[in-house]
């Protein structure tokens, strides 16, 4: 959890940094899994395996060196293009292993994806495939994307033992990423028949919360205290500015926290600004 003293702008930068690290970690995982699949493959002799592994590693290095220059988060990306990138990401893993992946493309007329949604969707698919492969009994995976005009819909199904659940620790990064975009994720499994993951990612950001002073009834003094809290004032400074005691300020802040339904001054400040 981030400390209360972190500003909303700093929080956003930290979240973007964390998202970039998660994206990079997923790409590294795909690269390593692909190299291991090549080295374990019974279809390739030593020379062919070495050549294929070098090719995968070289491609990954090029992507790593150019990733810093990409700023996809601020751009719209065609849904078919985002899906094609998923297929490219998984191609090395599929090419040199016994895993069969079926890709069901989204309609070309679907809405373009905001950059953060496109990044999250690709990371979710990669993480899901790696999770299913790590179970050791998966031979076929079906990946389907669709758009309903408001959401990107992702369905991922395997033919494994069907023991995966939404509470599986391996899915936690996916759950957190989906939740960060105000989406939903569900898992349905049938023992002996496989598991299916259904993900919904909204294409539009959630509406901004209504400013607190418009959402709940506040007294004139509470409005004054709220304004100073939002400006970063501490209790002593607020007391001095309003000519009241610190205990009175604490009383008003406590009431404001209860009315807002939050636990910290930082959250209260965010709601005050709307």
Image (cartoon, rainbow, N blue to C red):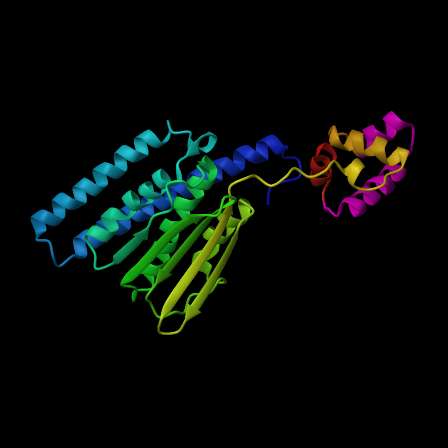
Horizontal and vertical percent position of residue 44: 10, 53
Horizontal and vertical percent position of residue 219: 89, 37
As drawn, is 178 to the left or to the right of 274? left
Q: Is residue 70 above or below residue 155?
A: above
Horizontal and vertical percent position of residue 221: 89, 34
Instruction: Give the residue displayed 9% in from the left and 51% down from the top.
Output: 46
As drawn, is 243 to the left or to the right of 85? right
Q: Count all numbered tags in the image, as a single digit.
A: 0
Asked whether 262 falls inside the magenta stretch, the response is yes
Q: Quadrant of residue 197?
A: bottom left
Front-lying residue, 137 or 265: 137
Horizontal and vertical percent position of residue 101: 28, 55
Instruction: Give the residue displayed 41% in from the left and 71% down from the top.
Output: 190
As drawn, is 176 to the left or to the right of 214? left
Dominant secondary structure (helix, strand or loop) of the stretch shown in magenta? helix
Q: Quadrant of the C terminus?
A: top right
Q: Range of the magenta residues? A: 235-263
Instruction: Give the residue displayed 29% in from the left and 67% down from the top.
Output: 137
Instruction: Give the residue displayed 73% in from the left and 46% down from the top.
Output: 262
């Amino acid at each position: 959890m981030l400390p209360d003293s972190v500003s909303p702008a700093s929080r956003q930068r930290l979240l973007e940094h964390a998202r970039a690290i998660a994206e990079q970690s997923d790409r590294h995982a795909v690269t390593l899994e692909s190299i291991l699949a090549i080295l374990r493959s019974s279809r390739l002799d030593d020379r062919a395996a070495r050549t294929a592994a070098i090719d995968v590693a070289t491609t990954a290095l090029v992507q790593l060196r150019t990733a810093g220059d990409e700023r996809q988060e601020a751009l719209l990306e065609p849904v078919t293009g985002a899906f094609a990138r998923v297929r490219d990401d998984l191609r090395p893993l599929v090419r040199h292993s016994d895993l069969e992946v079926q890709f069901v493309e989204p309609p070309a007329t679907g809405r373009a994806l905001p950059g953060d949604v496109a990044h999250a969707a690709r990371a979710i698919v990669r993480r899901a495939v790696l999770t299913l492969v790590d179970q050791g009994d998966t031979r076929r995976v079906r990946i389907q994307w669709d758009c309903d005009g408001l959401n990107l819909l992702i369905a991922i199904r395997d033919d494994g033992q069907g023991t995966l659940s939404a509470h599986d620790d391996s899915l936690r990064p996916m759950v957190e990423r989906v939740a960060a975009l105000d989406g939903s994720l569900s898992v349905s499994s049938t023992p002996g028949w496989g598991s299916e993951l259904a993900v919904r990612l909204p294409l539009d950001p959630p509406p901004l919360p209504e400013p607190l002073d418009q959402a709940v009834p506040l007294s004139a003094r509470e409005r004054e205290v709220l304004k100073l809290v939002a400006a970063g004032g501490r209790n002593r400074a607020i007391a001095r500015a309003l000519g009241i005691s610190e205990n009175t300020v604490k009383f008003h802040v406590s009431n404001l926290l209860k009315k807002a339904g939050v636990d910290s001054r930082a959250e209260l400040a965010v709601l005050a600004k709307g």
